[in-house]
Image (tube, rainbow, N blue to C red):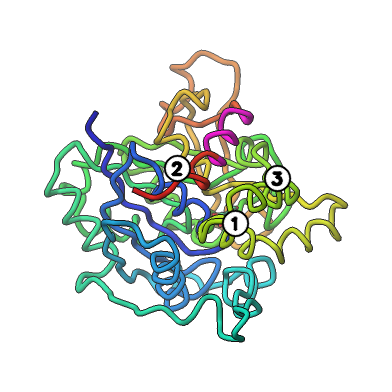
Amino acid sequence: MSKIRVIIDTDPGIDDALALILALASPELSVEAITTVAGNVTVAQAVRNASLLLEVIDPHSRPPVAKGATRPMTRPLRTAEGYHGEDGLGELSRFKTEAGVLRYPEPQQRLASQSAPTLMTELISGAPGEMVVICIGPLTNLAMAIQAAPTEMAKVKEIVIMGGAIQAPGNVTPGAEFNLYTDPEAARLVFTSGLPITLVPLDVTQRVMLRAELIEAVVRHIGSRVTQFVRDVTERLFGIEQERAGCAAIPLHDPLAVGVVIDPSLVVRRPLHVDVETGAGSAQGMTIADRRQIREEWKQPPNLQVCMEVDAGRFMALFLERICRPLT
Ligand code: BDR
Ligand code: CA
């Protein structure tokens, strides 16, 4: 079976880190590059976190890490350290070994010579019809690549985006999801590009919940470096959710976008026309999906395949199996 070649565009981020682990532990995928973007954290921190993660996982073949956009296309950056922690990874410097040294020392940062949009474009145009881009942060890098090199980017096999809220409420404002809220101009450019896009919105990602007690049980049974990291990176967030919602559980937003590429049968997709609000008012970054039950020719043609249902049990089983397996 030939592997699916993927580029992961990310702003790590706790669930980004879990998504990268899932991707790198999955034999169906070949991760050809990790491109970083400002979002949950600054892009410098995103590069650092991606590098740290590669040191923790230590995959046999280490994908290049490229630095991308430092801020959204037209707006100032608004990061999310309140949720993801000061370092974006749940404040890992809290953890020390028995000898008192950092469990997660500062990683070596070996950066690709190209910027994230350039590396993305080169990989896609070098393998026409083969490369899948999985975007789990704001869409700034992808939009910049499409704007600069539309013909080369048209050779992409598929783009899978974690973002948006179709019927579900938003998670950063009442109406908007974080990745699209952060850079709505980039999202609109991508959504109107005509490229083959699958959207993985909050409607499905909030149905795949990782519970703290499950991770505790996993670490008790499989005490590997990866499972220990999964526990450490999520611990602070479980505490926040326990206090906020009375339940120590977090949504696996970004891992589900990877899961959809590993096993497309995990979700039911619906073709929809989706627009993004680019104003600066209370609707900033909202997705407007045309779900009207009228004749298709009266509407704008669908521009996205939107995941509207998920087999949550099967996805969670996949996720747990992959974080427990020895890396190949
Ligand atoms: C998205 O926002 C970020 O905080 C997460 O990493 C995920 O990509 C969910 O709205
Ligand atoms: Ca993310």
User: Along the line of sight, which residue is nearer the eye, 284 or 177?
Assistant: 177
- Residue 281, quarter of the rendered image: bottom right
Give percent across and percent down for residue 287: 57, 43
Give percent across and percent down for residue 250: 69, 50
Q: Main SS type for the magenta part? A: helix
- The residue at the far top in this view is 295
Image side of residue 215 versus residue 302, left or right = right
As measured in the structure, the alpha-carbon distance from the residue carrying label 1 to the one carrying label 3 is 26 Å
- Residue 47, quarter of the rendered image: bottom left
- Residue 196 painted magenta: no
Closer to us: mark 1 or mark 2? 2
* Within-10-Å neighbours for mark 3: few <14, some 14–19, many 20+: few
- Residue 202, quarter of the rendered image: top right
Disc 1 marks which residue? 178
What's the magenta region?
Answer: 312-320
At numbered mark 3, what does the secondary structure look like: helix, strand or loop? helix
Kindly identify the residue that appears in the image at 70 percent across and 56 percent down: 173
Closer to us: mark 1 or mark 3? 3
User: Along the line of sight, which residue is nearer the eye, 184 or 225?
Assistant: 225
Image side of residue 72 versus residue 28, left or right = right
Disc 2 marks which residue? 258
Instruction: In the rendered view, tell whether residue 147 sits above or below residue 217.
Output: below
Q: Are dots 1 and 2 in contact, CB under 8 Å?
A: no
Disc 3 marks which residue? 214
Among numbered discs 3 and 2, the one appearing first in the sequence: 3
* Within-10-Å neighbours for mark 2: few <14, some 14–19, many 20+: many
Query: Mark 3 CB in 8 Å range of ligand 1?
Result: no
